[in-house]
Amino acid sequence: MDQYETLSISRTDGLMWIAFNRPQVLNAFNLAQWRDLKAVLDSAAGDDDVRVVAIQGEGENFSAGYDLTAALGGELAEPLPNAFRDYADVGNTACWAVWNLKKPVISAIRGYCLGGAFELAMACDFAYADTTAQLGEPEVLLSDAPPFLISPWVMGMRQAKHILLSGELISAETALSYGILNKLCEPDDLEATVTQMAKRLMGFAPETWHQNKSAVNRSYEIMGFQSCVEMGKEAFVMANVTPNEIKSEFFERFNRDGFSAAMKWVQNRYAV
């Protein structure tokens, strides 16, 4: 049985389920969770018994994205440009592992799917969700930016700008209309729906299925997808090292009142 600090793993008839297992923080990603995800994906790549990978979250949420409390509490102890690049590289490496895996990867989304987790879900080959899902990039409300800039490649310009420039969360129904999701189902049907798709994908010869995935992915790479992601990482770095009034006030409130109070203050700025 696979053992990881931040993940729970199960296998059924060729389908490997990877579940983020930090429900006490809405499965938010610390660096250990990103590294565990990369490790299990590397393991799945070399395991002929794994035909399809599905990714979900334990409890009621996929993931709230990067764990800002962990980052601000020590993972980014020195907020310098290279520290932010190194920090982003850990998550981006896991997203690239999904993108490059020669096996189908399906994201199974319920509840919050935010920030870095939203980017990870879009890097999967298929994205399924139930009607409880809420998706988006709320970190932009903190004058931040997505380090794995995949949104403009998955949806149209108007939709990408809505997600990345307003910071509003969108419903599962809206995400389906934006082209972010392949299918929407009722909460009790999500795992069964993903399993059904996994069984269909297992009907393909793995030697040729991955060639078709690679051809599709390579088409986007030729158009500049990899350069876009690298540029997005640099935008993330610049957003985090460029001072402004919102960031200064947020950090002051975080240090004085705690994360929840600081986030409430941020959210109230945009209340209408």
Image (tube, rainbow, N blue to C red):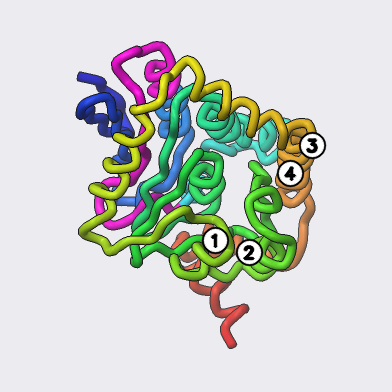
- Mark toward the start of the polypeptide (1 vs 3): 1
Specify the segment rendered in magenta: 40-64
Residue 85, how many percent across, how many down? 69, 33
The residue to which callout 3 is attached is 224
Residue 83, how many percent across, how many down? 67, 33
- Amino acid on which disc 1 is placed: Gly
Residue at image location 45% in from the left, 48% down from the top: 127
The one nearer the camera, 239 or 178, is 178
Q: Which of marks 2 and 3 is in front?
A: 3
Do labels 2 and 1 touch, CB within 8 Å?
yes
- Mark toward the start of the polypeptide (1 vs 4): 1
Q: How far apart are marks 4 and 3 (CA)?
A: 12 Å
Give yes or no for residue 46 being in the magenta stretch: yes
- Amino acid on which disc 2 is placed: Ile
Label 1, residues with CA under 10 Å away: few <14, some 14-19, many ≥20? many
- Mark toward the start of the polypeptide (2 vs 1): 1
Q: Distance between the residues labelled 1 and 3?
A: 23 Å
- Amino acid on which disc 4 is placed: Gly
Residue 248 visible: no
- Mark toward the start of the polypeptide (4 vs 2): 2
The quarter of the picture where the C terminus appears is bottom right
